[in-house]
């Protein structure tokens, strides 16, 4: 028990130290931003057809005979001229590529929603949106919002494809299941259709050192389990009941989007690699996002990568970014220790 007391004291000191650092960095960042308007964001658009073409040209120049290369360039220019004359470009299919790299709080949704708004302002029903998704899941309400952003694409009748090159688990799979087609690399990780929550309780340690903690609530279940207070069987039962209800909602959501999935088999919290996920109909095809994009380019689609960037001032780059990094570390640690519910 002496060890636990020392551990508790160490954690308290660590929290105070980190909190002090955050306050100092926050104050410096605030001073730098005082009197400044928030920087406006902007869209970065990359025409991936041009990127692929440039790579191919560079390789051809290094490998092919100059005479052969000259003939190819001549034929290509003639072909492009004929297409422009016929007005073919106006009717070509466009593939819009978006990226979502999710953390515990699905903080990427801040920019993701802007990218989707931009795409929906121009996209036609004959176009397509490809989302390269990577996430191990996180907080329920955060991934609920991220999924709602994808639903905006579906509601407009625009085909949605989601490619999972590495991982789309729990909250990540909640997003992925919305797609008309889910692509996965052979060893991508998918599934983890479950819910978890954990928190420490140091009530006995505090009691031993004659430390009282008072918690006053209005409402029987305003607080079920706590870190420092004495937990009851009734509160614990309600906490587990809430977890089960969240799991039921998660399963219903997956079934609504992918009715072919055997949800009782898939919703055990297990994860599967791409090939096994395909057998369970959690995905539709084994293919990487790179292969899918190259196929689209080769079949004549115009492929555009859309990224929202937020302009940052100098204080933000050096001060505020450090503050955000520290906050993310501390808050992620605290969320894992407290009663926040997670898709995992």
Image: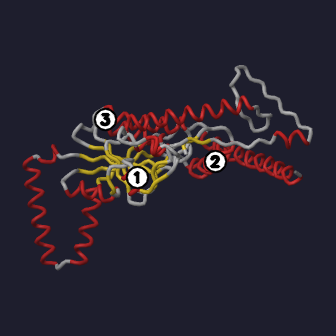
- Taking the spot 90% from the left edge, 42% from the top edge, the residue there is 208
Q: Nearer the viewer, residue 104 or 233?
A: 233
Q: Where is residue 119 shown, x and y percent of the image? A: 33, 40
Q: Do the CB atoms of the residues marked 1 and 2 lie less than 8 Å apart?
A: no
Q: Disc 1 marks which residue?
A: 277
Question: Residue 220: x percent and y percent?
Answer: 71, 21
Mark 3 or 1: the one toward you: 1
83 to the left or right of 155: left
Q: Which residue is under mark 2? A: 323
**Residue 10 in picture, x, y percent from top left:** 81, 52
> At 77% across and 41% down in the image, what residue appears?
201
Residue 127 falls in image quadrant: top left
Q: Nearer the viewer, residue 187 or 143?
A: 187
Q: Position of residue 99 (x, y in %)?
A: 41, 49
Question: What distance separates the C-alpha of mark 3 from that of mark 1?
Answer: 34 Å
Q: Which residue appears farthest toward the top when viewing the image?
A: 218
Of label 2 and label 3, which has the lower sequence position? 3
Q: Quadrant of residue 154?
A: top left
At label 2, counting other C-alpha atoms closer than 10 Å, the crowd grade (few under 14, some 14-19, many 20 or more) is many
* Picture layout, residue 53 above or below residue 141: below
- Nearer to the camera, 31 or 149: 149
Q: Which residue is mark 3?
A: 121
Residue 310 in view in this figure: no
Query: For this rendering, which residue is in front, 175 or 196?
Result: 196
x 37%, y 39%: residue: 258
Q: Quadrant of the C terminus?
A: top right
Q: Specify which label sits upstream in the sequence, 3 or 1.
A: 3
Left or right of 151? Residue 335 is: right
């Amino acid at each position: 028990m002496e060890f636990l007391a020392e551990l508790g004291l160490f954690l308290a000191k660590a929290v105070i130290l980190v909190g002090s650092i955050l306050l100092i960095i926050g104050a410096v960042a605030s001073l730098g931003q005082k009197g400044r308007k928030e920087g406006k964001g902007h869209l970065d658009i990359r025409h991936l057809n041009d990127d692929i073409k440039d790579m191919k040209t560079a390789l051809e120049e290094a490998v092919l005979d100059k005479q052969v290369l000259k003939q190819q360039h001549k034929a290509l220019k003639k072909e492009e001229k004929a297409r422009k004359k016929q007005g073919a470009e106006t009717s070509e299919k466009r593939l819009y590529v978006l990226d979502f790299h999710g953390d515990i709080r699905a903080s990427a949704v801040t920019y993701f929603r802007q990218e989707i708004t931009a795409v929906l302002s121009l996209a036609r029903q004959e176009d397509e949106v490809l989302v390269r998704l990577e996430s191990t899941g996180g907080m329920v309400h955060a991934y609920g919002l991220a999924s709602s952003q994808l639903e905006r694409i579906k509601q407009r009748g625009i085909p949605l494809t989601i490619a999972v090159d590495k991982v789309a688990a729990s909250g990540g799979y909640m997003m992925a299941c919305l797609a008309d087609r889910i692509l996965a690399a052979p060893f991508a990780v998918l599934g983890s259709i479950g819910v978890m929550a954990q928190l420490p309780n140091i009530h006995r340690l505090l009691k031993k050192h004659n430390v009282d903690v008072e918690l006053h609530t209005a409402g029987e279940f305003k607080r079920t389990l706590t870190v420092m207070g004495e937990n009851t069987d009734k509160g614990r039962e309600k906490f587990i009941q809430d977890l089960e209800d969240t799991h039921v909602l998660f399963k219903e959501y997956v079934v609504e989007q992918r009715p072919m999935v055997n949800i009782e088999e898939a919703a055990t919290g297990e994860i599967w690699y791409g090939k096994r996920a395909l057998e369970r109909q959690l995905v539709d095809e084994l293919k990487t996002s790179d292969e899918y994009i190259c196929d689209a380019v080769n079949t004549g689609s115009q492929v555009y990568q859309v990224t929202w960037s937020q302009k940052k001032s100098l204080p933000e780059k050096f001060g505020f970014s450090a503050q955000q990094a520290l906050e993310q570390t501390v808050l992620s640690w605290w969320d894992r220790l407290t009663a926040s519910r997670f898709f995992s």
